[in-house]
Image (spheres, rainbow, N blue to C red):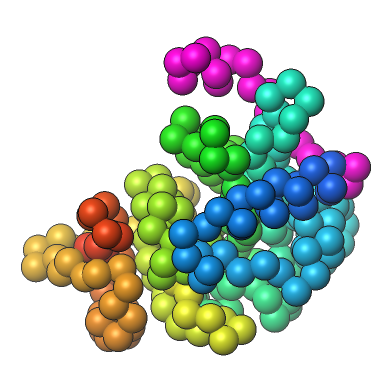
Amino acid sequence: MDQYSLLQQLRFRMLELSDAQAVIELRAQVLAQLAHPDQYVVEPDEEQFVATHLHLQPQLDSWGASIGVFDGCRLVAYAMLGIPSSSDPENLAHRVGALVTLPGAAAHLASCMVLPNYQGRHLQRNLLHIRSALAKAWGRDCCLAMVSLHNHSSRHNLMREGLCVSWIGEIDGLRRQLLACNPIQPWAFDMRGAQKVCSLDWQSQQSLLEDGWWGVSSEREPHGSSIWFARKLS
């Protein structure tokens, strides 16, 4: 079946608490096949994490929503969006700082997984666009995503859609990059003298980010990927 025909038969809808078990099972299938154990680390409480992102309750301080993709009755992909409160210590805006976004304007691109047989069909791209639109509708102008240095595919997909590496550091003992985008007020960069850095080169990325450079594009390579860094224009 070609890509267009497959997309025609798939169904997108908002997920509910009754879908929690299907999400947990899909996560288990995808996580069991990761190329590197650091690509995505299982949550301390998988059930609670999933439930939090299926509980569409805007009256709460911090809440979430998820979109599912179904082939018939089978869940084949999902994507989560987190809407943290300004005072939530888990709000990633506290790490990237006011030059990127204020806590009250941030939304989290929390998790997106696609079953192996359905990968390479632009589902992640479509789910990213849907989440960005939802974030904007709920008053969140900036989307933030946390990515492992070893997760070359997810980072490449996010950067291809305009997200930039704006921070690197340790979160809960894990080395992570934070990617950001602001479709309302896109950032501009000076590409003169742009520097190419291996995506696993922690120290070089940290030095560049501290000096005002951002990761602006990703380049796939045979055994990983590289990131192009450029200075952010004020």
Residue extending farthest left: 193
User: Is residue 8 found inside the magenta-colored segment of the image?
Assistant: yes
Taking the spot 66% from the left edge, 42% from the top edge, the residue there is 78
The residue nearer to you, when weighing 74 against 138, is 74
Taking the spot 21% from the left edge, 70% from the top edge, the residue there is 197
Above or below 43: residue 109: above
The residue nearer to you, when weighing 190 against 217, is 217
The image quadrant that residue 53 belongs to is bottom right
Query: Which quarter of the rendering shows the C terminus?
Result: bottom left
First to last magenta residue range: 1-18
Q: Picture coordinates of residue 132 (x, y %)?
A: 56, 45
Residue extending farthest right: 18
Residue 184 shows in the view: yes
Residue 136 shows in the view: no
User: Is residue 175 left or right of 127 when viewed as pictured?
Assistant: left
Q: Picture coordinates of residue 93 (x, y %)?
A: 57, 73
User: Is residue 33 left or right of 2 when viewed as pictured?
Assistant: right
Taking the spot 47% from the left edge, 80% from the top edge, the residue there is 175
The residue nearer to you, when weighing 97 against 158, is 158
Above or below 101: residue 65: above
Above or below 231: residue 159: above
Q: Picture coordinates of residue 135 (x, y %)?
A: 63, 49
The residue nearer to you, when weighing 211 against 168, is 168
How many numbered markers are drawn? 0
Taking the spot 56% from the left edge, 65% from the top edge, the residue there is 40
Q: Picture coordinates of residue 7 (x, y %)?
A: 55, 20
